[in-house]
Image: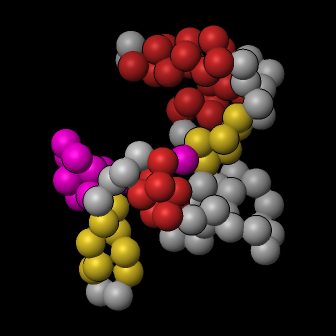
Amino acid sequence: MRVCEKLWEDGSWADVTDPCTGQAYFGPASSAIYADVNANMLLLKYPTEDVGGCRVMRHPVWDFCCYPATLFTTAPYPALLAALSSINAL
C-alpha cells in the first residue's frame, strides 16, 4: 500500500489487487478480476495448497505467513525501484 502511495506522490497510477475478490483495491469495482493465485503459480512458480476448498499460495521462504500481492503501475521501472527502495529504507 505504501508503494502505491509513493508512486501516486510521484505522479504515477498504481493499484494492487484484493486477494479475496481479484479486483482493484483502490479502484472502482468492476466485473474484471485478476486471479493472484493463478498468476503467481504461472509467473513465479509458487506452490499452492488447498485450504478449505480454496487454493492458497505458499511463499518459498515465508510459507503462509505472508501474501505476495500483485501491484500494477504506469510508473517507469526506475521510479518503481526508487519507490520500493524508499519503502524498504523505513
Q: Residue at x 41, y 46 (%)?
A: 44
Q: Is residue 80 above or below residue 25?
A: above
Q: Is residue 4 left or right of residue 2?
A: right
Q: Position of residue 32 (x, y in %)?
A: 76, 68
Q: Position of residue 56 (x, y in %)?
A: 34, 68
Q: Is residue 33 above or below residue 68?
A: below
Q: Which residues are magenta?
A: 58-70
Q: Residue at x 65, y 18 (%)?
A: 77
Q: Residue at x 22, y 47 (%)?
A: 60
Which corner quadrant holds the N terminus?
top right
Q: Position of residue 26 (x, y in %)?
A: 69, 51
What residue occupies the far bottom of the structure in this picture? 53
Residue toward you, 16 or 34: 34
In the rendered image, residue 36 lying in the magenta stretch gets the answer no
Main SS, magenta region, reads loop
Q: Quadrant of residue 28?
A: bottom right
